[in-house]
Image (cartoon, rainbow, N blue to C red):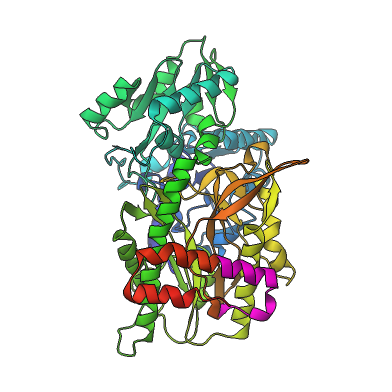
């Protein structure tokens, strides 16, 4: 993987940036991977870190000083970053996880008293800003958050997106806007708040039963929201809400106001207001707009937990969506096998996988878009955890080895995310050993039973244990929450060894989470097997309520990659039961070659 921006162009951009830094007497500039909503996936306007460095991963922090520049990112992106930063003079700074703030310590250690650091408060999380200010302040280093240096050097900076906002309506929505606002106000009252400020886009989309297309792969729109005791205000692009939708929102107590007016509305709040906000989901810039006299209550957005717990109606829609997505995958994998077996075919490349998958899903009802950029990595490229094939620079799928495919779809009735690995030509016992170890990790966590309220990071070790037993590990979390026709990465749960096991990360019934252990051997191959699961009650004992997982994803796991001798009898039973379920649920949606492929790939082992 190489960068599409020449090193010479990146050098010019850095030179211009450093000239602006000298003009403003700034010794170090921090450019985070974030926007005014602290989103994971960013509109083009706020992809300044990528524009400056050329690193295209979704997580990373760029820092420039007078004589150094670096990108801080975690193990998921190290191989990718090394390739994309090569020859640029920008260093890769390796950190243990995407949540790490090691770059703050680096600033404290590499700057001296009296020097200055700048970062745009409009894209800096409030919680991070406080840590940054504390570390730098203790060392006598000045912090400036009122400067956007990119504004003066990024001449062709993209404009704000403005895709139309649409309703997410019946039959896919089980709780109407009035009901959701009432529940939010009840949660606000329990915390002693009269008003609530929300900036996280998926919270807003879920709460108002609206969807958009301002952010690639995520059906959200740029907005802030302010909920009061009686009404609510949605700050959104002026032309994004059609007049008819605006009227319907007004009838339900929601005023639509210009996107840029959110800060002014906050500044006009009455001192008697008791404002609830989430310091991890609000920027320092927007927080600064709140008058000093307003009493601020800091807590996790009530909508963050509410939207993570899918109700029975939503779960039913997700199950139906999984059948459609699984059928699309069967059609795709049948096509893939036939294509690879055809001696007269044109060379099949990794980038062609994305097109074929997209076409298969697009034929399914209620499909809207991919839920993220497809990862299709053959052999060594499969070891790059967030690899992105690009036409003309991708690998030809030929010869022998393993092909890893991680893909997903956005449907009106749910969001999907699935990873499978398939053999190409002949594979080795080493391939099969790694694949089977990963499968054992998937089975271990998928079949676990645990007390309700278990902090989700604590579950990570269950999937790693079979892999650790072989002296192997992987450099990413085991699972992330998944939205309901929303972001493919959703909190508050996170099955990750590097996540803090805080109270709000507790696993609760109704949460949809991925389980995706892996093994990656740089330069050789990568293996990841991923299913989505639904947490459900497993009953009550004298020790309390227990939860277990229902596997939602319906797609065969390729038994040709398995070393049967490494599986216990209970693991074989789990796989056979899973494949029987997949066959029963998907067969009614398939015919012809895809149906035959399903039967062949779900045979008991």
- Quadrant of the rendered structure where residue 586 is? bottom left
Question: Relative to the observer, which residue lies in front, 295 or 453?
Answer: 453
- Quadrant of the rendered structure where residue 295 is? top right
Q: Is residue 48 visible?
A: no
Q: Residue at x 40, y 67 (%)?
A: 587
Q: Main secondary structure of the magenta part?
A: helix
In-image side of 6 versus 437 (left or right): left
Question: Relative to the observer, which residue lies in front, 562 or 91?
Answer: 562
Q: Residue furthest right?
A: 542
Q: Which residues are magenta?
A: 561-577
Q: Residue at x 50, y 16 (%)?
A: 291
- Quadrant of the rendered structure where residue 171 is? top left
In magenta segment, residue 563: yes
Q: Could you say where residue 355 lies in the image, as x and y percent from the top left?
A: 32, 67
In-image side of 38 versus 573 (left or right): left
Q: Residue furthest bottom?
A: 343
Image quarter hosting the C terminus: bottom right
Q: Could you say where residue 155 lies in the image, as x and y percent from the top left?
A: 31, 46
Number of marks in the image? 0
């Amino acid at each position: 993987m190489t960068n599409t921006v020449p090193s010479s162009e990146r050098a010019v951009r850095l030179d211009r940036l450093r000239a602006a830094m000298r003009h403003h007497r700034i010794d170090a500039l921090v450019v985070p991977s974030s926007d005014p909503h602290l989103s994971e996936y960013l509109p083009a306007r706020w992809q300044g870190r990528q524009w400056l460095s050329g690193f295209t991963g979704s997580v990373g922090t760029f820092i420039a000083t007078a004589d150094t520049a670096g990108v801080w990112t975690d193990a998921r992106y190290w191989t990718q970053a090394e390739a994309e930063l090569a020859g640029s003079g920008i260093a890769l700074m390796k950190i243990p996880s995407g949540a790490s703030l090691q770059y703050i310590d680096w600033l404290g250690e590499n700057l001296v008293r009296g020097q200055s650091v700048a970062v745009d408060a409009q894209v800096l999380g409030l919680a991070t800003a406080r840590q940054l200010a504390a570390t730098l302040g203790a060392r006598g280093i000045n912090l400036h958050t009122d400067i956007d240096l990119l504004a003066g050097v990024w001449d062709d900076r993209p404009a704000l997106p403005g895709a139309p906002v649409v309703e997410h309506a019946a039959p896919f929505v089980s709780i109407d806007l009035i009901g959701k606002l009432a529940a939010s106000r009840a949660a606000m009252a329990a915390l002693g708040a009269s008003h609530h400020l929300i900036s996280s886009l998926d919270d807003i989309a879920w709460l108002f039963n609206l969807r958009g297309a301002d952010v690639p792969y995520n059906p959200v729109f740029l907005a802030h929201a302010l909920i009061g005791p009686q009404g609510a205000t949605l700050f959104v692009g002026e032309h994004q809400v059609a007049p008819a939708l605006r009227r319907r929102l007004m009838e339900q107590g929601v005023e639509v106001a210009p996107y840029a007016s959110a800060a002014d509305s906050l500044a006009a709040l009455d001192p008697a207001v008791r404002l609830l906000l989430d310091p991890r989901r609000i920027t320092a810039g927007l927080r600064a707009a709140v008058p000093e006299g307003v009493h601020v209550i800091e807590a996790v957005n009530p909508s963050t937990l509410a939207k993570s717990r899918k109700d029975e109606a939503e779960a039913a829609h997700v199950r139906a969506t999984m059948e459609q997505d699984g059928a699309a995958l069967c059609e795709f994998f049948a096509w893939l096998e036939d294509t690879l077996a055809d001696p007269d075919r044109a060379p099949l490349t990794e980038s062609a996988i994305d097109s074929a998958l997209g076409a298969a899903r697009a034929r399914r009802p209620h499909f809207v878009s991919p839920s993220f950029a497809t990862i299709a990595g053959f052999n060594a490229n499969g070891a790059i955890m967030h690899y992105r094939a690009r036409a003309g620079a991708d690998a030809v799928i030929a010869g022998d080895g393993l092909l890893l495919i991680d893909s997903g779809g956005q449907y009106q009735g749910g969001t999907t995310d699935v990873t499978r690995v398939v053999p190409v030509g002949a594979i080795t016992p080493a391939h099969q050993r790694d694949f089977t170890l990963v499968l054992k990790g998937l089975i271990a966590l998928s079949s676990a039973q645990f007390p309700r309220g278990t902090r989700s990071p604590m579950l990570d070790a269950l999937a790693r244990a079979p892999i650790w037993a072989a002296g192997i590990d992987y450099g990413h979390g085991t699972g992330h929450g998944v939205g309901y026709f929303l972001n493919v990465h959703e909190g508050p749960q996170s099955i990750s060894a590097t996540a803090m096991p805080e109270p709000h990360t507790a696993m609760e019934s109704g949460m949809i989470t991925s389980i995706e252990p892996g093994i990656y051997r740089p330069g050789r191959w990568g293996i990841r097997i991923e299913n989505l699961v639904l947490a459900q009650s497993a009953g009550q004992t004298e020790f309390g309520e227990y939860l277990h997982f229902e596997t939602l994803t319906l797609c065969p796991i390729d038994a040709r990659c398995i070393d049967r001798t490494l599986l216990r009898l209970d693991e074989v039973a789990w796989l056979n039961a899973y494949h029987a379920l997949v066959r029963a649920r998907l067969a009614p949606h398939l015919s012809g070659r895809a149906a035959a492929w399903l039967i062949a790939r779900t045979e008991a082992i």
